[in-house]
Image: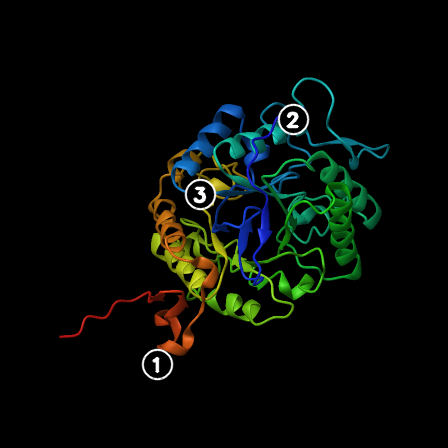
Amino acid sequence: MTAYPSLPRLQISANQRFLITEEGKPFFWLADTAWELLHRLDRADTEYYLRTRAAQGFNVIQTVALAELSGLHTPNAYGRLPLQKDAAGLPDPLQPDLDGEYSYWQHVDEMIRTAASLGMYTALLPTWGDKFHQMWGNGPEIFTPDNAFMYGKWLGERYRDVPSLIWVLGGDRPLQTRRHFEIIQQMALGIREGDEGGHLMTFHPKGGVSSSLYVHEETWLDFNMVQSSHGAGIRNNYRLIQTDYQLHPVKPTLDAEPCYEDIPIDFNPDNGYFDEVDVRQAAYYAVCSGAAGHTYGHHSVWAMADGVYSSVDMEQSGAFFIMPWKEALHRPGAGQMQHLRQLMTGVDSLTAQPAGHLLEEPLSGANTPAAIQGKNYIFIYSPRVCMLK
């Protein structure tokens, strides 16, 4: 059995707005997006990635057990697939790869352990959304309400005693049918039964919405996640955060997938690329609107792209991924995220609340400011600085 470092478990604050440790200390979520980490990197590269992000001030890593990019058919760095096949030749969620030397799930264990040893939590998606609602991507759809419950229970039992884990259901797909909802509901209930409610749980939605659209009132949802996404237009993720902030029951919220640094705007290289200004604006907009933290992402890092490629398939050279992931780790936006964390950990963050009433007739569009106030502080963010003579 893997020995896991004993980080304090995370909980929800008494005012239901923020995350805290079980010791009662504020926890400002500063995550990095590494969806393909478990699928594409070996142990040495995994450690390099994690050490780099820890040094940059990140304290949560978002990743996926059954990965998006052909995660059920393309083996990991050690030639292992996450699931064995059933009689029909399909990957079976009830038969995880556990046999032999260094199985797929032992590699998952090692990543969680290494992250925890560096003081970082793992926000783990049991599966990417194409495995229950293909819509686009590789799939295949392998989940039913019944096997989703059993898979969730197995995961919950396996990681019951790992304090550094946060569960993230969903995976970039809408819940369009009753079947979709039931699969997620049963997976969540299975995890809860397996881990006896020992970990926080949330939901990663499709682009442009919050988890609150689908599951806000579910008792298993501890906090909301927004995906403000990568579309063209001005950064206005503050709207989604503000909407969540007004909901009842009160729950924390944060933007878990804003625009990635160096991703083509609206996924089209002809539109140019989001840069550090865009990712910084999304981060300050979210936190100054009441978010409990923020997630950064780089386009090459989420996919662990090892070169320059024309598409997500990573088969031909082109302008969709414009650098390898090791170079991308050091892009300016990543380094700037630590300043946001330092700002919020330097004050009594548990007293923070939106303070839009302090802004008299604020500009709209790309110049919209945002403000929060707490005990002995007021922070006002404006994406543009106007110099008056």
Residue at image coords 46%, 41%:
300
**Residue 275 at least partly seen:** no
Kindly state the secondary structure of the residue where label 2 is placed: helix
Q: CA distance from mark 3 to mark 1?
A: 35 Å
Q: CA distance from mark 1 to mark 2?
A: 55 Å
Q: Earlier in the sequence, mark 1 or mark 2?
A: 2
- Residue 223: give x, y in percent of width and height: 60, 57
- Rendered-image quadrant of the C terminus: bottom left
Instruction: Tell how many labels.
Output: 3
- Residue 37: give x, y in percent of width and height: 54, 36
Q: Nearer the viewer, residue 249 or 214?
A: 249
Q: In this figure, which residue is indicated by the disc labeled 2?
A: 106
What's under tag 2, amino acid-wise? Gln
Q: Nearer the viewer, residue 37 or 153?
A: 153
What's under tag 3, amino acid-wise? Phe
Between circles 3 and 2, the one closer to the viewer is: 3
Q: Is residue 175 above or below residue 188?
A: below
As drawn, the label of residue 360 is 1
Kindly state the secondary structure of the residue where label 1 is placed: loop
Q: Is residue 360 above or below residue 101?
A: below
Between circles 1 and 2, the one closer to the viewer is: 1
